[in-house]
């Protein structure tokens, strides 16, 4: 017997009592949710196309290797800003890797969560993660550039300020990675006579390393995209010298972008777009490394 | 190492206390030193907070030596960098713009973010989710300076003026508010999705079993069950928007305005601090101290907002753990 449309309709009514109007409502709701999701994605797409259209024509080897110019935007480059950003990555990493991992180990492996001082540290890190980056800039200005450390407006001051800013990110991710190492591994190591530190150093840390490395890279990619703290620390926007160590003046890509965007001469805007592309490429490379590490080395326990 | 252990133990006195006594040798001193070093690193976070508070308060107290409390908090005219009679220190325009632009941002981010969360958690196939979630993470990872560039060079001239025909100045609060919304959208979407996904499957199955449609399940069962987590997502989003600096600095200009008009320049607390620090002002003057007074105000506001968020997240965790 041939199944007619009428049969299908009858069966559908028996199984699914929803009326046509109700099904329309269901479909409309689902479509609204989907379209709203697409808005965010569309925004990202338009943003990338817009930046690429403005900036790509300016990109060249000369753009990377020449100093910025306030007078002739067409000859301007990002040499000093690129140097500054790359150096900031290295120096910030040298600061946050040991301090972040040590804090995470202390909180996960040693600290007694019942003690008030350990709870204070935890609460503190939660709160620090929510402090606006501009406030870290004020801290950097008052304590690192001037005040107790008095380093001046130098690269090291910028790196330390950015380091303090992203330290909570490193700590949170490293703690998760350490927590993911099963306690049977610790117990086995301790039962074989290893001390607590030997257990951590030889068993826990190697197991947690891929997770920690991912966290450090994510933290660094947040750090180098930050503009506000560097404004207060005093990074130079159009810096016409090669970088000369940790204790000299410095520039960074976000600072040069900011200065170029806000310049009254619109010719500088395309310069900003080209510098944005350089910044985004660095971020893309760092995130690719993070994804590679996660996929290549992540352990399932 | 292992053989040294053995000799140490063999040479020591035998009996029940021998193992305990062994713990007091050189190696366990090393263990103690390591523990102390790790604790010192952990204490750095407390030092950071203390540093922030002291550096803010120090200059803020001197600031209030010069400027009255009432003038600062209730004054409606913010002109700290002018000279003479035109100089005034009413912070209300900055607080107003901070709150106003945050609200505009949330007006955009809340519906879009929650809809994205609902779609990803309740409707999307695993394949779509694997594609959309990382893309939202990419959006979350775009530096805010890039969003600021986009606000000034695309949202204001192309979207607002050409496409929508809105009359706005080149520096305006509307474009800053919209981009602020896009900035916090991924935060809201991701935290709210976690909250929705944490609702136990049995609740959905129960509702389906009673004949509810998918939309009814989402709106009347899952959404209310995840409500405190969703509210926490909104508060976290708000806290990010309140502290955002460069988007507003670039898109909304540098004129503090106590107005509902979004077509003109707005200056938030964070944007004022950055704008002032860009200029060359001498250290120690009242102009310099405004950075710290405004910074303290911003710091206290974000701390309060964050305290609410932490409390809500904690309550939401207690429900299903």
Image (tube, coloured by chain):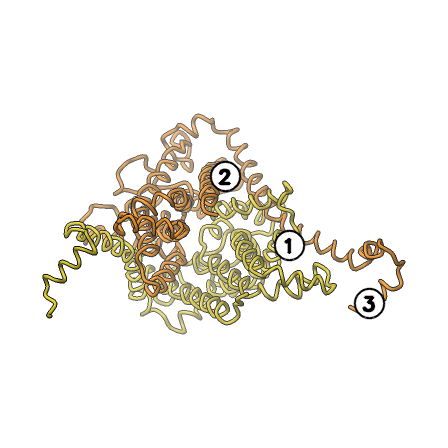
Please check whether the numbered discs 1 and 3 fall on a single chain: no
Q: Chain of mark 1?
A: A
Residue at left offset 14%, top offset 52%:
A20
Q: Position of residue B178 (x, y in %)?
A: 30, 48
Residue at far front of view: A1
> Pointer 1: residues within 10 angstroms few (<14), some, or many (20+)?
some
Please name which of the two marks, 2 or 1, marks the residue nearer to the observer: 1
Colour chain B is painted in = orange
Q: Chain of mark 3?
A: B
Q: Which mark is residue A235?
A: none
Quadrant of the frame with the N terminus of chain B: bottom right
Whether residue B73 is situated above or below residue B171 in the rendered picture: above
Q: Chain of mark 2?
A: B
Residue B287 visible from this viewpoint: no
Please name which of the two marks, 3 or 2, marks the residue nearer to the observer: 3
A3 to the left or right of B298: left
Colour chain A is painted in = yellow
First in sequence: mark 3 or mark 2? 3
Instruction: Determine which residue is flagged by label 1.
Output: A109
Q: Nearer the viewer, residue B221 or B11?
A: B221
B10 to the left or right of A236: right
Q: Which mark is residue B292?
A: 2
Whether residue A236 is situated above or below residue B2 in the rendered picture: above
> Pointer 3: residues within 10 angstroms few (<14), some, or many (20+)?
few
Residue A54 visible from this viewpoint: yes
Instruction: Determine which residue is flagged by label 3.
Output: B4
Q: Position of residue B90 (x, y in %)?
A: 40, 31
Q: Position of residue A290 (x, y in %)?
A: 48, 66
Whether residue B57 is situated above or below residue A195 in the rendered picture: above
Look at the numbered discs 1 and 3 and tell me whether their residues touch, using CB distance below 8 Å: no
Q: Position of residue A9 (x, y in %)?
A: 13, 59
């Amino acid at each position: 017997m041939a199944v007619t449309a009428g049969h299908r309709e009858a069966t559908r009514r028996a199984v699914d009592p929803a009326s046509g109007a109700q099904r329309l409502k269901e479909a409309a709701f689902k479509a609204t949710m989907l379209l709203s999701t697409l808005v965010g994605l569309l925004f990202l797409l338009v943003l990338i196309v817009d930046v690429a259209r403005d900036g790509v024509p300016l990109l060249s080897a000369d753009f990377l290797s020449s100093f910025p110019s306030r007078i002739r935007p067409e000859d301007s480059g990002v040499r000093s800003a690129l140097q500054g950003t790359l150096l900031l990555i290295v120096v910030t990493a040298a600061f946050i890797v040991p301090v972040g991992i040590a804090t995470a180990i202390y909180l996960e492996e040693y600290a007694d969560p019942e003690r008030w001082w350990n709870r204070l540290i935890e609460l503190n890190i939660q709160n620090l993660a929510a402090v606006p980056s501009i406030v870290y800039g004020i801290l950097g200005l008052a304590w690192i550039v001037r005040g107790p450390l008095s380093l001046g407006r130098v690269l090291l001051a910028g790196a330390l300020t950015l380091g303090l800013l992203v330290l909570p990110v490193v700590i949170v991710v490293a703690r998760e990675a350490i927590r993911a190492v099963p306690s049977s591994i610790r117990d086995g190591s301790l039962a074989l006579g290893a001390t607590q530190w030997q257990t951590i150093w030889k068993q826990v840390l190697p197991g947690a390393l891929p997770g920690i490395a991912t966290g450090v890279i994510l933290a660094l990619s947040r750090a180098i995209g930050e503009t506000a703290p560097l404004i207060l620390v005093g990074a130079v926007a159009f810096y016409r010298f090669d970088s000369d160590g940790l204790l000299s003046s410095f520039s960074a890509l976000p600072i040069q972008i900011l200065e170029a965007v806000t310049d009254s001469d619109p010719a500088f805007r395309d310069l900003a777009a080209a510098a944005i592309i350089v910044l985004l490429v660095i971020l893309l490379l760092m995130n690719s490394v993070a994804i590679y590490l996660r996929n290549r080395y992540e352990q399932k326990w | 190492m292992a053989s040294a252990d053995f000799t140490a133990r063999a040479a020591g006195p035998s009996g029940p206390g021998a193992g305990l006594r062994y713990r007091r040798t050189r190696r366990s001193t090393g263990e103690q030193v390591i523990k102390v070093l790790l604790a010192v690193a952990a204490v750095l976070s407390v030092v950071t907070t203390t540093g922030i508070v002291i550096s803010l308060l120090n200059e803020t107290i001197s600031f209030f030596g010069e400027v009255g409390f009432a003038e600062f908090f209730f004054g409606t005219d913010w002109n700290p960098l002018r000279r003479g009679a035109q100089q005034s220190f009413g912070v209300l325009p900055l607080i107003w713009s901070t709150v106003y632009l945050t609200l505009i941002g949330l007006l955009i981010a809340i519906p879009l973010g929650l809809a994205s969360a609902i779609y990803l958690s309740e409707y999307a196939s695993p394949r779509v989710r694997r594609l959309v979630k990382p893309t939202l993470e990419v959006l979350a990872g775009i530096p805010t300076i890039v969003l600021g560039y986009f606000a000034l060079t695309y949202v204001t001239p192309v979207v607002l003026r050409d496409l929508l025909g809105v009359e706005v100045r080149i520096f305006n609060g509307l474009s800053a508010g919209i981009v602020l919304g896009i900035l916090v959208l991924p935060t809201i979407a991701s935290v709210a999705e976690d909250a929705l996904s944490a609702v136990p499957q049995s609740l959905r199955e129960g509702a389906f079993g009673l004949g509810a449609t998918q939309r009814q399940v989402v709106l009347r069962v899952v959404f209310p069950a995840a409500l405190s987590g969703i509210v926490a997502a909104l508060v976290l989003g708000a806290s990010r928007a309140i502290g955002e600096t460069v988007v507003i600095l670039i898109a909304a200009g540098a004129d503090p305005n106590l107005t509902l008009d979004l077509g003109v320049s707005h200056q938030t607390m964070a944007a004022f601090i950055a704008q002032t620090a860009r200029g060359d002002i001498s250290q120690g003057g009242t102009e310099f101290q405004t950075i710290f007074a405004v910074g303290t105000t911003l710091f206290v506001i974000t701390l309060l907002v964050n305290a609410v968020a932490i409390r809500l997240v904690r309550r939401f965790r207690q429900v299903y753990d």
